[in-house]
Amino acid sequence: MASTTSMPSVLFLLLAAFAASASAATFTIKNNCGYTVWPAGIPVGGGTQLNSGQTWTVNVPAGTSGRFWGRTGCSFSGGSGHCDSGDCAGKLSCTVSGQTPATLAEYTIGGTGNPQDYYDISCVDGYNQPMSFSCSTGVALSCTYAKCPDAYQYSTDDTKTHACSANSNYQITFCP
């Protein structure tokens, strides 16, 4: 039986863990393409290989801004290699942005006191493959060709940023 002095400590730790995860977001990334995609994400996610029909789930903490993108034509051995598009310094697990061209799913997950998340698709770094991006409480975005109307085409195109309620989850699909 727990002592009365340790019970409040355990309760505090449980509440702190719950509060820390309450504003986190889950990103589910799916490959609907008829070919392999190597999605990447910074600062959270790194990268992985997704064969056709596979999904990858990434948990992003509150207060994080970042991006996911798909890489194509990759070949890796021991975590190093090269991609034809979206390559990130020849690594499977990215720590830097991908090289152009790369269609980006960009996000900001609301932090303490911020009731909203923000998300967009960007083709500012070029277009390399079809993508959709949606949140559980907002608008579904789709970019299936270069210069698609749902995506940023230049860096100050702020009409392309959309808001979601905090605690939303996200879906990114390659070849929607």
Image: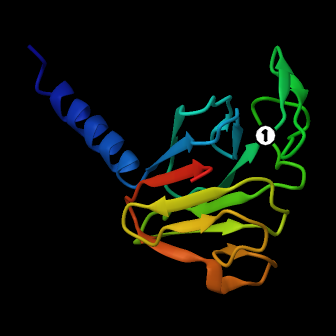
- Does dot 1 land on a helix, a strand or a loop? loop
Q: How far across and down, in percent of the image, does residue 41 sit?
A: 68, 45
Comparing 109 with 7, the one in front is: 109
Give left or right: position of 68 versus 9.
Answer: right
Give left or right: position of 174 versus 140.
Answer: right
Comparing 149 with 167, the one in front is: 149
Q: Which residue is mark 1?
A: 95
Location of residue 138 with respect to 157 vertically, above or below: above
Q: How far across and down, in percent of the image, does residue 123 sit?
A: 78, 67
Q: How far across and down, in percent of the image, does residue 6 sit?
A: 20, 25
Location of residue 124 with respect to 133 vertically, above or below: below
**Other residues around mark 1 within 10 Å, as few (<14) / some (14–19) / many (≥20):** some
Q: Residue at x 54, y 42 (%)?
A: 30
The residue lying furthest to the front in this view is 34
Query: Where is residue 165, by image quadrant?
Result: bottom left
Query: Where is residue 78, by image quadrant?
Result: top right
Residue type at tag 1: Thr
Give left or right: position of 84 versus 36.
Answer: right
Tell me the quadrant of the picture where the N terminus can be found. top left
Q: Residue at x 27, y 36 (%)?
A: 14
Comparing 43 with 72, the one in front is: 72
Give left or right: position of 93 versus 3.
Answer: right
**In this figure, which colouring scheme has been used for the structure?**
rainbow
Location of residue 107 with respect to 46 vertically, above or below: below
The image shows a total of numbered marks equal to 1
Q: How far across and down, in percent of the image, does residue 164 sit?
A: 44, 70
Q: Residue at x 77, y 74 (%)?
A: 147
